[in-house]
């Protein structure tokens, strides 16, 4: 195993305003523990900003867990990278990345891209419309409001990327600026 240059890593994190970073299997208990740490870090922020950042983190990590569960992946295979950083203007970037089936990637990118093209009033209308839609019988996930709600709270349009990998997989990254 190659030794990591932790000093360079620390300098990069400091330069980029990284306040929280996690990489590895994303279990329910870890989501909770990281969420507690994030709340602690956000104590000095306005309650609405702290709630928006925390809400984005929770929604993004739960989406990763739900996606993995829908594919029958074990906790060990539910790996993710989650980063929360603050830029020089005081905005927060909540980023998440995880493995997806390559065939699912373009649909995810299209969904995020469609939300990124909407203005605040269109996002609000889409949110209300989604609220009124009947939930599919036997659905194991939410009502599809999470990503819409994140987009509504974001100060800039959502961004994402998809990196094709071997074995029919891809790495999907989502970035939310609050």
Image (cartoon, rainbow, N blue to C red):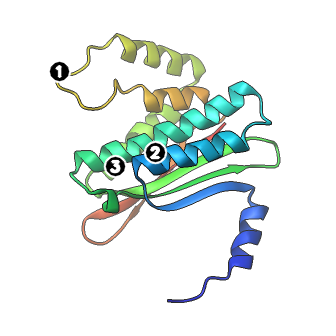
Judging depth in this view, the residue of 82 and 30 nearest the camera is: 30
Q: Distance between the residues labelled 3 and 2?
A: 20 Å
Q: Circles 3 and 2: CB distance less than 8 Å?
A: no
Residue 7 in sight here = yes
> Residue at coordinates 58% horizontally, 24% vertically from top-left?
119
On the rendered structure, is 68 left or right of 96? left
On the rendered structure, is 73 left or right of 23? left
- At numbered mark 3, what does the secondary structure look like: helix, strand or loop? helix
The residue that label 3 is drawn on is 106
Residue 172 in sight here = no
The residue that label 2 is drawn on is 61
Q: How far apart are marks 1 and 2 (CA)?
A: 24 Å
Estimate the x, y position of residue 118 in percent, counting from the top left.
52, 27
Q: In which quarter of the image is the C terminus?
A: top right
Q: Which mark is residue 137?
A: 1
Q: Which residue lies furthest to the top in this view?
A: 132
> Residue at coordinates 34% horizontally, 27% vertically from top-left?
142
């Amino acid at each position: 195993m190659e030794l990591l240059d932790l000093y360079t890593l620390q300098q990069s994190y400091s330069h980029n305003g990284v306040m929280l970073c996690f990489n590895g299997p994303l279990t329910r208990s870890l989501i909770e523990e990281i969420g507690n740490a994030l709340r602690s870090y956000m104590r000095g922020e306005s309650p609405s900003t702290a709630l928006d950042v925390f809400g984005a983190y929770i929604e993004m990590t739960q989406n990763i867990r739900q996606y993995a569960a829908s594919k029958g992946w074990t906790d060990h295979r539910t790996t993710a990278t989650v980063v929360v950083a603050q830029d020089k203007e005081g905005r927060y970037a909540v980023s998440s990345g995880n493995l997806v089936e390559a065939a699912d990637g373009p649909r995810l990118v299209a969904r995020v891209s469609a939300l990124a093209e909407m203005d605040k009033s269109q996002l609000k209308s889409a949110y209300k419309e989604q609220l009124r839609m009947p939930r599919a019988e036997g659905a194991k996930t939410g009502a599809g409001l999470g990503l819409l709600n994140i987009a509504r709270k974001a100060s800039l349009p959502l961004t994402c990327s998809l990196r094709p990998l071997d074995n029919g997989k891809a790495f999907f990254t989502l970035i939310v600026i609050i």
